[in-house]
Image (cartoon, rainbow, N blue to C red):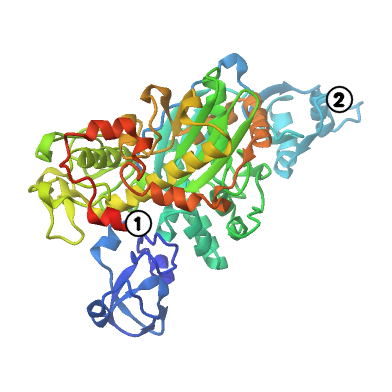
Amino acid sequence: MDALHRGGVAFQAECGAQGTCGRCVVQILSGQCEWPGSELLAAEKRKEGFILSCQARVKGDLVVKIPETISESSPAGTNRCPVPEVEAVAPSELSPLSKKVALELAPLSAGENASDLDRLARCFTGEGEVRYSLSVLRSLPEAVRQSQGQITITLAEDGTSKHLLKLEPGVQTARHFGVACDIGTTTVALQIVDLNTGRVIDTAGDYNGQIECGADVISRILYARKPERLEELRQRVVRTVNSLLDATLPRQGIGAEEITCAVFSGNTTMIHLLLGINPRHIREEPYVPALKTPPMLSAGELQLHLWPEAAVFFTPAVGSYVGGDITAGVLCTQVHRAGHGTTLFMDIGTNGELVLSGEDWMVSCACSAGPAFEGVGISCGMRAAAGAIETVDIEAGGAAIAYQVIGGGSPRGICGSGLIELVAGLFTRGIIGRDGRFNEAKADKRVRLDEHPRTFVLVEAGQTSTGKPISLSERDIANLMRAKAAIYSACGLFLKKVGLTCADIDRVYIAGGFGCHLDIQKAITIGLFPETDPGRFEYLGNTSLQGACLALLSHAHRQRLAEIAKRMTYIDLSSETDYAHEYTAALFLPHTDDSLFPGVMKSLRGRWSKRRHTPHFIELCF
């Protein structure tokens, strides 16, 4: 696998090269390699030379055949992503991470013994410590004399001191830009922001290049155990960020040297990997990360395609599994949606994080949901981008289906919101049972019972932009059910731990990248969310990116982020003995306990046959 990665072969090694997902199968045509074998491959496949590349050691020259499913598994290119723009900070309240200030130094005088630096330092009298970089000192004498003392400085503040980043001759304040970036486990999204006005100029996103080395944070932590693989993960995410910058900046006519600061937000593992810091201790008891809030760094240190001296700020984390993406999300809810009493913030993606907030308290927890909500691990899945089916409505009997595609046109895949609606429709129409398996008695021409795994065809090959059908297999449904079970069980146990029920929650905020058109009622139908009034839910979009943008634009918001991280109490659900039981009970549609979803069960009566459960369901429960 390492050799193939270096050769540019795209993999979806979801398990982090642990040999458990079976996604890296290749066929050895000639040559020799060592590998221990695997039960994931049938005996006849092994005889034909098929191996798991992550477990095989090269012993000489090889000729390897790459299956089409691998070579096409990882998306390429930069795509626009539907990230809601942050609510603008009022111009009067703008205090960006870096600011440009025009200064006029005292005239040069032969009789005065003050140096250029002395005259510059007088401009900061009473403003605390100012640090000067060597590049600023080198540019100082020529800049001062070229403009007769009229200069423009770029200044950044890290909370304890000011950093003079750049010095230019004359007045150069008209153009001033920054970057807000969310480093997600599955996707990376960024915004280019005009720091003079607070206006978002451009938004772009793409899959995190690290996906090929693991689908979730745990698999990537395992992958990063070798130093060379840790460096590979760092380079992959940096390349993803740089590809977005290389696409957006020229599109807007902005030079990299005009970006003077950036704010990065992400979970604790993603920030460790961005910095090239081994994250192994995040998953090892006592689960203490190397750092929660990195110091302010420079773009050059991170090898970003920005002006090398640009200041880079990171949103603060709470702990190993509640990172800066969550503090950024809570910032969004506090700034723009205050006054709702007790609120539950849920960031749903590859990881599921929950924050429960009252007037003067805040508690959080986290769970591993997997990347199904973002289309990864689903045969026809994709993120919420152009060409993705985002809404699905199955009419009676399942023969007629209506769907909506992001951007219009022919579909090329299905995103998280579409998956949830499709599974809800299949369930309520009786096409699948509570165990997620197809009901043979209600199967029609769309259900391919003779395929392995059995499949429901949503869109035939001739109607897609790829020329391939868009379908959902029982394996895909199982992946989605595991993801929803992780979220629901974490939410239920979390509320029990703090002595509350769903009825006590005044507002539920949903963040994450699986679609702004999520139908809350259908999400409740499959058991993703507790059954409560759908009117209490509000979808916020990518709050990690929005919070990063707020921090980029406002000193007050940067201070508030630090306060949120300091105040938040973290509850570790993984150490709770009841969590496994709660999770297992939630592995069915909508749940094994009908009393938790009385409205859903009532609506299903009359649609199903009198046979309530399949034998498989009874076997697993008892």
Decide if residue 548 is in sight here.
Answer: no
Q: Is residue 124 above or below residue 375?
A: above
In the picture of the structure, the residue carrying the numbered disc 2 is 109
The quadrant holding residue 306 is top right
Q: Is residue 68 above or below residue 251?
A: below
Amino acid type at mark 1: Phe
Amino acid type at mark 2: Ser
Residue sitting at 62 percent across and 22 percent down? 359
Quarter of the rendering occupied by the C terminus: bottom left
Tag of residue 622: 1
Tag count: 2
Marks 1 and 2, how far apart in space? 92 Å
Local crowd size for mark 1, using a 10 Å CA cut-off: few (<14), some (14–19), many (≥20): few
Report the front residue among 419 and 528: 528
What percent of the width, then of the height, locates residue 146?
69, 29
Residue sitting at 66 percent across and 54 percent down? 290
